[in-house]
Image: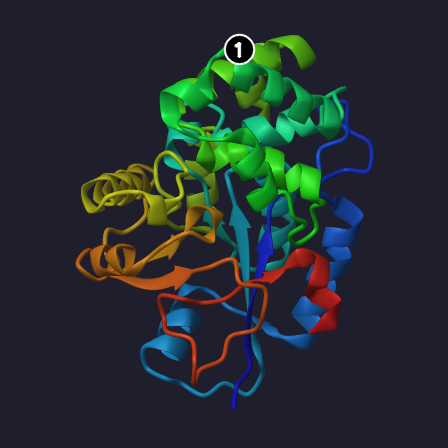
């Protein structure tokens, strides 16, 4: 039986970069080593291979590997795209369309930038606690900081407990009006750089996305706002997904047979229903394991974290 893995990449950066040097990333030299390793051991798939494998159930002589790149980072255009094009490989890219079209930071990336600033995660959580009190968030929302800390302050993946707690609070738990105010205050204090200027350096542009498509790369849907879909009502999910499809058409991708990459790996039965009704044929999760044809549906494809590549 043909083995299939999908590898999940985010930031790929040079060893020394002046732009937020503390940002968590895979170093470019390590990325090159991984690509050479994967290209030798696997057949790196393109979109036609995926259709053959998942729809036609074609058998391949070599095990298969899909290369995926989330969130639309400028490093994908500057470093990843030239490497893949030179080797004749197709990468699958999933930017949140608002970040690219409007040059606006996602909440996910705002949190990452703060964690890569001069502030420690302890500083950030203390600031968050103080703002929770001064903004009377408990009284206005019934959210209890101490209870939230007890529930979410636990290590997960490659992050320690303090980091996970800050990310959860600022990416999904706090209501958007409080979250926006807190992000603005913290970024102004610890980064002192406009969010628009950060975004211009952080993401590739709409023009660059079109160039990547023309250069043979595949773009899929990562929604508009990069939200936790499972926390959204059906209509909101549908709007997010349809706006993502509109973006794909804008950069030159086809309307049918597109691929969904769930922001934060978050989805539910409603999400899958929307995908099926809108010509999606594959959904990618953040579950860190290889694909199991007997257990995993085509809308719940796991992806191996790039830090675990050499284990497969």
Front-most of 73 and 301? 301
17 vs 175, left or right, is right
Image vertical order of residue 254 relative to residue 127, above or below: below
Is residue 203 in view? no
Front-most of 87 and 293? 293
136 vs 38, left or right, is left
Q: Which residue is labeled 1 in the image?
A: 134
Which residue is at a point 64% across and 52% down the rendered structure image?
Answer: 156
Q: Position of residue 191 (x, y in %)?
A: 67, 14
Q: Position of residue 174 (x, y in %)?
A: 45, 29
Which residue is at a point 44% across and 82% down the rendered structure image?
Answer: 293
Which residue is at a point 76% across and 31% down the rendered structure image?
Answer: 22
Image vertical order of residue 11 relative to residue 255, above or below: above
Q: Position of residue 26 (x, y in %)?
A: 72, 46
233 vs 308, left or right, is left
Residue 248 quadrant: top left
Image vertical order of residue 181 relative to residue 171, above or below: above
100 vs 270, left or right, is right
Q: Position of residue 118 (x, y in %)?
A: 76, 19
- Asked which secondary structure carries label 1, the reply is helix
Front-most of 35 and 283? 283
Residue furthest to the bottom: 1
- Total residue callouts: 1
Which residue is at a point 51% across and 68% down the rendered structure image?
Answer: 45
Q: Locate the C terminus and report the quarter of the image it occupies.
A: bottom right
Residue 19 quadrant: top right
Q: How is the image coloured?
A: rainbow
Residue furthest to the right: 16
Is residue 58 in view? yes
Residue 38 quadrant: bottom right
Crowding near the residue tagged with mark 1, few <14, some 14–19, many ≥20 C-alpha atoms within 10 Å = few
């Amino acid at each position: 039986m043909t083995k299939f893995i999908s590898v999940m990449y985010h930031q790929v950066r040079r060893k020394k970069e002046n732009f937020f040097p503390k940002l968590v990333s895979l170093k470019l030299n390590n990325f090159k080593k991984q690509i050479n390793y994967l290209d030798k051991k696997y057949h790196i798939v393109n979109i036609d291979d995926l259709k053959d494998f998942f729809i036609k159930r074609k058998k391949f002589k070599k095990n298969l590997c899909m290369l995926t790149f989330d969130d639309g980072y400028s490093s994908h255009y500057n470093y990843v795209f030239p490497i893949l094009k030179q080797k004749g490989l197709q990468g699958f890219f999933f930017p949140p369309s608002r970040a690219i079209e409007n040059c606006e930071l996602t909440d996910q990336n705002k949190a990452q930038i703060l964690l890569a600033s001069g502030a420690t995660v302890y500083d950030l959580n203390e600031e968050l606690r103080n703002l929770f009190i001064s903004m009377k968030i408990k009284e206005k929302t019934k959210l209890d900081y101490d209870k939230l800390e007890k529930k979410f302050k636990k290590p997960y993946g490659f992050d320690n407990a303090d980091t996970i707690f800050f990310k959860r609070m600022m990416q999904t738990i706090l209501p958007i009006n409080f979250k926006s105010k807190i992000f603005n205050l913290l970024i102004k204090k610890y980064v002192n750089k406009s969010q628009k200027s950060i975004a211009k350096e952080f993401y590739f542009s709409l023009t660059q996305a079109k160039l990547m498509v023309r250069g043979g790369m595949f773009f899929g849907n990562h929604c508009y706002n990069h939200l936790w879909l499972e926390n959204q009502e059906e209509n909101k999910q549908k709007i997010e997904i349809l706006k993502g499809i509109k973006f794909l058409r804008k950069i030159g991708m086809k309307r049918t047979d597109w691929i969904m990459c769930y922001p934060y790996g978050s989805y539910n039965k409603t999400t899958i229903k929307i995908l099926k009704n809108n010509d999606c044929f594959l959904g990618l999760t953040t579950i860190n394991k290889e694909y199991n044809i007997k257990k995993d549906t085509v809308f719940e494809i796991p992806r191996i974290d790039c830090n675990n590549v050499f284990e497969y």
